[in-house]
Image (cartoon, helix red, strand yellow):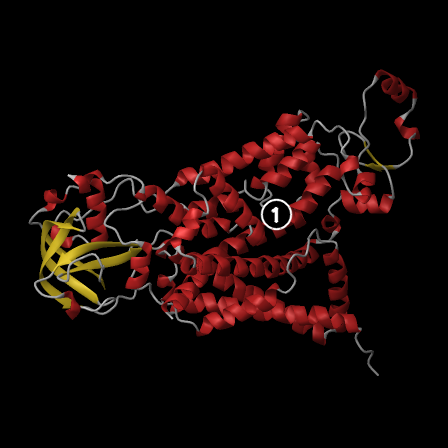
């Protein structure tokens, strides 16, 4: 009975702590998805792949969307002609490198601020490097779904023959769908209507009151889904902390490599939202640090 | 005859009803935890305002959605607007991962409304390993102000002071007056009990027990585990379980009621 009570108390403790942060994340992402035009962002991004990956990784700070909200945004960025490195950087970094996650991690580990900075810093580093690596793929279209690939801008290979051909053909005479109002002209292949739907955020054309209504609907939609996953994740965490003997948790990782692999596997199984996973992590950190501590000899006890 | 609504429109309405019920139930749950002070068993006091704000926000959101749903039911033009909004909502960039989350959230909130959280017990403290030191994940304030008069230090302040200067002889004969719950540690002799508190830094998930042994004049069986005591006495050094430790030599033990906020921070 005592164990059951502990499980339930831990379960509600995790939920009550995480719910405000989940709400905040959902509110921000809904507001920004419905009110920000990514085309203005793309125009300001540097063309150098490394810098573009770095800037893309930082966009999460003004676009704090978690992993289920950032895929469509990354897709729109790509279709609108953003460098691949920027889109990939954003895709990987946005769920972690954003103010909501920063605050949530700070709350969970407020006595160890180094964890907060290491989490954000290393995520930024990894996302930038991976984004940069992806930039070596000049034509990204073969890797994407056909509908999106057809809507992407055709990369211009600046070979001498191609350059000569471009000079001989006026832009005005080319067929296809073009995005107007961009600093450079972006041409799209494929069905113009489908392309238009992918390129622009379709919601931005709606009047503000309708957008506000849609924002509320989106908040409820995301809360329904992420809240459900949070409940399952919290239940697993509470049951693990109470019912699984501490030795078993500690034996998850006997060294640095296996403990990381064990936590990666656990993350795959639980799939908890990045906004609130710091609270989930506390449970395991407690165990692992306890093991570290007990391995430190207590000099005062031996004299 | 009024046209019958298409069959497919029932499912979204049902989903909306579940959404509204889940939002309102969760707002009631959060506000109930705050109003009944049960939140003290779940969260660090610094974050209670967040739970309060979330409860109020969810209440507002739930009421807004209720009004919206009622408006749609009674107003045909609103229904048209709702339909066009639903079509627009389909254009929202979102991947559906867990469509039945509302039912789950509602069930959990309804259960939570009837559930009263309990503070962790002495058995939990024993399972987690009660110590008079603070480990790496535990709160290690860079500075803290301890009471200069030893008899005014709380149990946590004693442990923090010990952490800074762990030599027990440094505190010999200092007066002590501490409160906490009783733990019977197996390895300790019958005339020694451990007075303990749980400390939290964020929420109950990171609660960890701290404790100081108390040397009694008689058997510890007079004080049951989990009983709350105020212990007065003097500090001394004793060797318990092969380890030199700071121990309170009790001169007076008073049974006290369990505090509303049993954790320390």
The residue singled out by tag 1 in the image is: A67
x and y percentages locating residue A62 in the rendered image: 58, 41
In terms of depth relative to the viewer, which is nearer, B109 or A42? B109
In this picture, is B252 found above or below B133? below
Q: Measuring 72% from the left and 58% from the top, which residue is drawn there?
A: B89
| Structural crowding at the residue carrying mark 1, measured as other residues with C-alpha within 10 Å and reported as few (<14), some (14–19) or many (≥20) | some
Between B187 and A64, the residue placed more toward the observer is B187
In the shown orientation, is residue B176 left or right of residue A125? left
Q: Chain of mark 1?
A: A
- Does B193 appear above or below B146? below
Q: Residue at x 15, y 70 (%)?
A: B222
User: Can residue A247 be seen in the rendering of this structure?
Assistant: yes
Image check: B55 left or right of B42?
Answer: right
Residue that protrudes farthest toward the top in the picture:
A160
Residue found at x 59% / y 41%: A94
The x and y percentages for residue B25 are: 52, 70
**Quadrant placement of the N terminus of chain B:** bottom right
* SS for dot 1: helix
Horizontal and vertical percent position of residue B102: 60, 66
Report whether A119 appears left or right of B122.
right
Task: Please identify the quarter of the rendering in which residue A173 is found.
Answer: top right
Q: Is A274 positioned to the left or the right of B188 in the image? A: right
Q: Position of residue A141 (x, y in %)?
A: 79, 36
Residue in view at x 29 percent, y 66 percent: B260
* Residue B25 at least partly seen: no
């Amino acid at each position: 009975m005592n164990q059951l009570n502990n499980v339930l108390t831990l379960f509600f403790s995790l939920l009550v702590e995480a719910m405000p942060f989940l709400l905040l994340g959902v509110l921000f992402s809904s507001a920004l998805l419905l009110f920000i035009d990514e085309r203005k962002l793309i125009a300001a991004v540097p063309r150098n792949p490394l810098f573009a990956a770095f800037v893309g990784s930082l966009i999460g700070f003004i676009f704090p969307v978690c992993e289920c909200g950032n895929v469509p945004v990354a897709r729109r960025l790509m279709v609108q002609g953003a460098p691949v490195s920027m889109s990939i950087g954003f895709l990987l970094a946005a769920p972690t490198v954003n103010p909501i996650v920063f605050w949530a991690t700070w709350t969970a580990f407020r006595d160890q601020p180094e964890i907060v900075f290491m989490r954000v810093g290393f995520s930024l580093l990894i996302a930038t490097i991976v984004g940069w690596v992806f930039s070596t793929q000049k034509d990204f279209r073969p890797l994407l779904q056909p509908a999106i690939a057809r809507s992407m801008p055709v990369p211009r290979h600046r070979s001498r023959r191609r350059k000569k051909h471009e000079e001989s053909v006026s832009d005005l005479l080319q067929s296809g769908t073009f995005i107007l109002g961009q600093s450079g002209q972006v041409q799209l292949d494929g069905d113009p209507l489908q392309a238009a739907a992918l390129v622009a955020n379709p919601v931005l054309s709606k009047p503000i009151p309708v957008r506000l209504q849609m924002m509320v609907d989106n908040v409820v939609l995301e809360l329904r889904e992420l809240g459900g996953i949070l409940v399952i994740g919290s239940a697993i965490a509470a049951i693990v902390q109470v019912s699984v003997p501490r030795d078993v948790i500690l034996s998850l990782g006997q060294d640095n490599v296996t403990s990381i692999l064990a936590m990666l596997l656990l993350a795959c199984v639980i799939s908890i939202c990045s906004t609130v996973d710091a609270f989930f992590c506390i449970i395991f950190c407690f165990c692992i640090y306890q093991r570290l501590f007990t391995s430190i000899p207590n000099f005062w006890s031996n004299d | 005859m009024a046209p019958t609504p298409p069959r497919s429109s029932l499912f979204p309405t049902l989903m909306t009803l579940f959404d509204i019920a889940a939002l309102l139930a969760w707002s009631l749950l959060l506000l109930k935890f705050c109003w009944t002070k049960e939140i003290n068993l779940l969260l660090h006091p610094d974050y209670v305002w967040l739970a309060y704000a979330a409860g109020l926000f969810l209440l507002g959101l739930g009421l807004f959605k209720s009004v919206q749903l009622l408006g749609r039911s009674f107003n045909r033009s609103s229904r048209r607007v709702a339909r066009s909004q639903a079509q627009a909502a389909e254009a929202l960039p979102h991947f559906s991962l867990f469509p039945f989350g509302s039912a789950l959230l509602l069930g959990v909130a309804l259960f939570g409304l009837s559930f009263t959280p309990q503070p962790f017990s002495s058995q939990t403290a024993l399972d987690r390993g009660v110590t008079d030191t603070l480990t790496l994940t535990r709160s290690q304030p860079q500075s803290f102000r301890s009471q200069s008069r030893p008899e005014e230090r709380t149990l946590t302040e004693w442990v923090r002071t010990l952490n800074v200067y762990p030599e027990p002889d440094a505190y010999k004969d200092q007066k002590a007056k501490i409160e906490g719950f009783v733990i019977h540690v197996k390895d300790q002799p019958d005339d020694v009990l451990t007075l303990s508190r749980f400390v939290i830094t964020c929420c109950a998930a990171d609660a960890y027990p701290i404790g100081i042994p108390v040397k009694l004049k008689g058997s510890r069986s007079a004080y049951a585990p989990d009983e709350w005591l105020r212990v007065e006495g003097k500090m001394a050094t004793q060797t318990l379980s092969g380890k030199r430790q700071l121990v309170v030599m009790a001169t007076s033990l008073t049974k006290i009621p369990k505090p509303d906020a049993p954790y320390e921070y």
